[in-house]
Image (spheres, grey):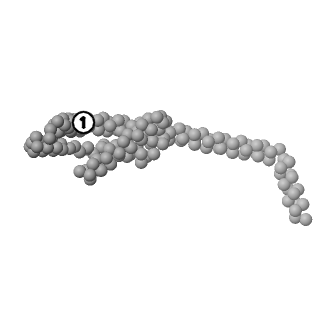
Amino acid sequence: SMLRIFRKIRNDILGSPKTNRYLFYAAGELLLFIVGILIALQINNWNQERIEQKEIREYALSLSAAIERDMEMLLPVEMQIRASIRQAEELASYIRDRTMEEMDNADLFFLTTHIGYRPYGWNRAALDQLKAAGGLRRMQNKQLAERISDYDALTRHLDQDYREDEESA
């Protein structure tokens, strides 16, 4: 029958030394091809990691410069806060040993006029870019990533405090 013929042809082909050499050669070529692909993938992964770390480093440098600018801009805010505290202490001292009749309206007005302050807008561009790119998750220094995250939370909290103070005022 036809199956016997095909079996005989298959056995003749597989039994020949040329076929065995060809199959061995083909298996070797396939193995080299697979190893080549694996090496190319690993090189690509290394390159991608290098590019990501360079990108994170650039974000971190931008963020560092933004934090420096934030700190410089906080100096006038700190001076306004200290002036407000001094004013509150002077008001407390003024009213501590006086009766209502002894208090002068002009003094009270001066001592209760709120100097006020407005925290400026934080330099968020670098931080927002770092977060959007997933840089905090990809940072190798997890302690630094946590501190950056804490800074982000603090500045958002300060903005929220200011909005609440403004609403209550």
Q: Is residue 128 left or right of residue 104?
A: right
Front position in the image: 115 or 75: 115
Front position in the image: 104 or 82: 104
Q: Quadrant of residue 118?
A: top left
Task: Residue at 87% x, 62% y: name it.
Answer: 3
Task: Residue at 14% x, 41% y: name it.
Answer: 99
Q: Quadrant of residue 107?
A: top left
Front position in the image: 93 or 148: 93
The percent position of residue 160, horizontal first and vertical second, equals: 32, 48
Q: Amino acid at mark 1?
A: Glu
Residue pointed to by mark 1: 78
Q: Quadrant of the N terminus?
A: bottom right
The percent position of residue 145, horizontal first and vertical second, equals: 44, 38
Q: Quadrant of residue 112?
A: top left
The percent position of residue 165, horizontal first and vertical second, equals: 27, 48
Front position in the image: 117 or 45: 117
Residue 7 in view: yes
Residue 90 in view: no
Q: Is residue 19 left or right of residue 147?
A: right
Task: Residue at 61% x, 43% y: name it.
Answer: 37
Q: Is residue 70 left or right of residue 54?
A: left
Q: Is residue 157 left or right of residue 4?
A: left
